[in-house]
């Protein structure tokens, strides 16, 4: 059986890795979009209260002394 050229093997490995990376990115994006409203609600709560009952305009460093 003939051996394949090293350049051809490198191209196939590179393309396989790129396809796998794109597939993982697409799955992560779909899962994120599926739970977008829940994530939006959580981040909205974090931005408004900041865990200390502070609003966005208040300086949290005043309370961390």
Image (cartoon, rainbow, N blue to C red):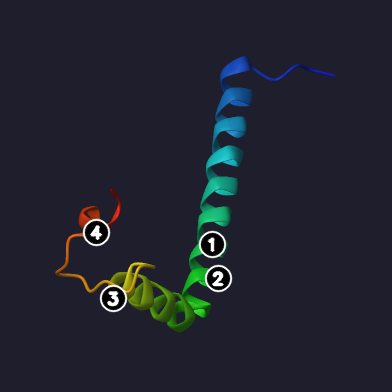
Q: Residue at x 64, y 24 (%)?
A: 9
Which callout, 4 or 1, points at the residue further toward the start of the chain? 1
Mark 2 vs mark 4: in front:
4
Per the image, the residue denoted by label 1 is 28
* Mark 2 to mark 1 CA distance (whole Å): 5 Å
Q: Residue beneath label 4, please?
A: 60
Q: What element carries label 1?
A: helix
Q: Reading the chain from its start, which is encountered first: label 2 or label 4?
A: 2
Q: Is residue 14 above or below residue 52?
A: above
How far apart marks 4 and 3 lie (CA) works out to: 12 Å
Q: Do the residues labelled 2 and 1 touch (CB within 8 Å)?
A: yes
Location of residue 44 in the rendering, given as x and y in whole percent from the top left corner: 34, 77
> Which residue in the protein does label 3 denote?
48
Circle 2 is placed at which residue position?
31
Crowdedness of circle 3 by 10 Å Cα count: few (<14), some, many (20+)? some
Q: What element carries label 2?
A: helix
Helix, strand or loop at mark 4:
helix
Q: Which residue lies furthest to the left in this view?
A: 57
Q: Which of marks 4 and 1 is in front?
A: 4
Mark 1 vs mark 3: in front:
3
Q: How crowded is mark 1: few (under 14 residues within 10 Å), some or many (20 or more)?
A: few
Q: Residue 24: image x %, image y %? A: 57, 54
Residue 52 position in % (x across, y down):
35, 68
Q: How far apart are marks 3 and 2 (CA)?
A: 25 Å
Mark 4 neighbour class, 10 Å CA radius: few under 14, some 14 to 19, many 20 or more: some
Q: Mark 3 or mark 2: which is in front?
A: 3
Distance of mark 1 from mark 3, alpha carbons? 27 Å
Chain-order first, disc 3 or disc 2: 2
Quick one: 23 or 34, which is closer to the camera? 34
């Amino acid at each position: 059986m003939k051996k394949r050229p090293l350049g051809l093997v490198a191209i196939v490995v590179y393309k396989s890795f790129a396809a796998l990376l794109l597939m993982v990115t697409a799955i992560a994006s779909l899962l994120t979009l599926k739970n977008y409203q829940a994530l939006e609600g959580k981040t909205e709560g974090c931005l408004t209260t900041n865990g200390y009952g502070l609003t966005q305009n208040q300086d949290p460093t005043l309370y961390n002394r």
